[in-house]
Image (cartoon, helix red, strand yellow):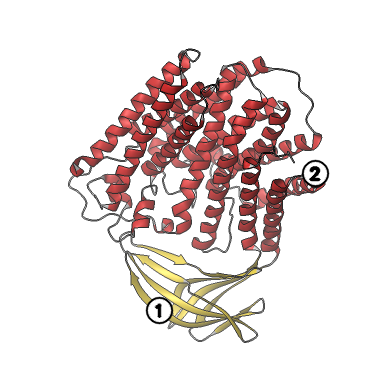
Amino acid sequence: MLLWLPELGFGALLLACTASWLISGVALFARHRVALLPIRAWSLAIFALIALAFAILLLLFLRDDFSVLYVAQHGHSQLSGLLKAAALWGGHEGSLLLWLLCLSGWAAVFAWRSEPEEATASVTLAILLLIAGCFLIFILCFSDPFVRVFPPAVEGRDLNPMLQHIGLILHPPLLYLGYAGFAVCSAVMLAALLNGEFTPQTAGQCQRWAAPAWSFLTAGIILGSWWAYSELGWGGWWFWDPVENASLLPWLTATALLHSLAASQRTGGLRHWTLLLTLGTFVLSLLGTLIVRSGVLLSVHAFALDEQRALPLFVLFAFLSGASFLVYALRANRVEQPVPPAPPVLVVTLLLFSSAALIVLIGTLYPMLYRLMGWGQISVGAPYFNLVLLPFGLLALLLMCVGGFRRRLAQWIAHSGVLLAALGILCSSLQRHEVSLNVAIGESVTLAGYEFTFRAIELQAQGNFTTEQAVIDVSQQGKALTQLRPERRFYTARRQQMFEPGIDWSVLHDWYVVMGEKSGEDRYAMRFYVQTGILWIWWGGALMIMGVLAARWSRRTPCAG
């Protein structure tokens, strides 16, 4: 039985694809005559099939089955069990299967939580199954993770060394849970449009799914920035890289959506804002998932690229996003009804977030379009984004403070997180000290009042890599504070060298050292950093998540800011 596991996994995906298209087609074409219970049961069954395929691929990694091409490309027998599991989404095929698992999981939860009397529940599930069916066709035709290789490889090529970090183990699942959660929000709104209705109850139902989806997306972005800070060795946490921007775009529109939904849930107002922000967040989530995977956007964060599948990915993206906006264009005017005007502060807030998303979108896609037009290479980096977005950020903080006296506890928590993160960004930008030197064992370097003493070099062999580790003591005025251990790792399977920073934290400061190449007898090139407020950024993000979830699960309706 174990011999045929890959074929069983492929068969499960094939059955899920067939069922998704059949059930969604019947439900959409006969939506007024289809009961919820059969669609709910089929949604759970399709999730079970996709989960079975995912579990089989996971078992193949854990068993080091190098007869499967994808396992041979990203696995290695010396990886820990946790890293073998993470290797599942370390490449193109597995990352899309993970996205599909998250999407089908959200659909199953929606099916489980939906009430039979909800008029749009069947149509919502049908739309989710249609989206899943589109992904399944692409995976089966262009991205099959169960392809065999003959003869089987003796050893795997190993997981990309940059992915062998706890931040990148957790980052993709959380990010994809956020992306797929907004697919549920979009399906709810599309179902409402197809049924010709938009009520406060519709907005409330969308809010039910938008809050946890936003929280997952925010947690994924936080872990991604922590990984970049801890792994890339450049002393920063955000680089305005295309892949970073691809996750920031739906976050900006989703944050605006949370505010818009609050008003729509209270009065039914801001219908078009809410509809467009919901569909826009879904489309930008697809952009972050699909376009980045195509290899068109080049990034230090992109590990699952394949330009040969760029055209099918673009077709998939164009079909899903085009169909969503087509439904809006054809049906939105059928749900018009008189509503009270929205508060001016809320409208300005929505405009700020939407404008910021547009600015990031232009800065991210412009180099790609410039290259595709044959005009050459151009880059848009941190100076552009920092300069253009600064006024929007300052105005958003001002509006948040102006409207702060009439908020509830949950919003105080969320907005306190915004202020703490903003303070961390400001301090880390202004209070950043760094120096690059060649340092020998026994020498000390003084930076920002701290003394870094290079004590020793230790050589170790650990699993799939060997490491050269420096021992550096950090002190202030003769008082020992901490010890840092930056590394130079060599991954034998990939013949790749990695520089692992040595980092330690306090409430105010962090100490950061990167060990570079050997420049002489017991002498190494090193970069030393002392920064202020980095942790505040991530603590602020955690407070924002706590506030949004508290508002979601409280009985009160959260106010818009």
Query: Is residue 400 something that shows in the picture?
Result: yes
Compared to residue 486, the image places residue 242 above or below, namely above
- Which numbered dot is residue 458? 1
- Give me the residue at 57% from left, 20% from top: 327
Which image quarter: residue 235? bottom right
Classed neighbour count for the residue bearing mark 1: other residues with Cα under 10 Å, few (<14), some (14–19), many (≥20): few
Query: Hey, what amino acid is under mark 2?
Result: Arg
Total numbered circles? 2
Identify the image quadrant of the N terminus.
top left
Which image quarter: residue 253? top right
Q: Earlier in the sequence, mark 1 or mark 2?
A: 2
- Give me the residue at 33% from left, 51% from top: 74
Compared to residue 303, the image places residue 465 above or below, namely below
Q: Position of residue 298 (x, y in %)?
A: 49, 46
Q: Name the foreground residue: 261 vs 361.
A: 261
Query: Is residue 389 something that shows in the picture?
Result: no
Identify the image quadrant of the C terminus.
top right
- Which numbered dot is residue 406? 2
Q: In this view, does 235 lie to the left or right of 69?
A: right
As helix, strand or loop, the secondary structure at mark 1 comes to strand
Q: Where is residue 215 in the image (x, y as percent from the top left)?
A: 58, 45
Q: Name the foreground residue: 3 vs 311.
A: 3
- Give me the residue at 45% from left, 16% from top: 34
Q: Name the foreground residue: 420 vs 519.
A: 420
Query: Hey, what amino acid is under mark 1?
Result: Glu
As helix, strand or loop, the secondary structure at mark 2 comes to helix
Nearer to us: label 1 or label 2: 2
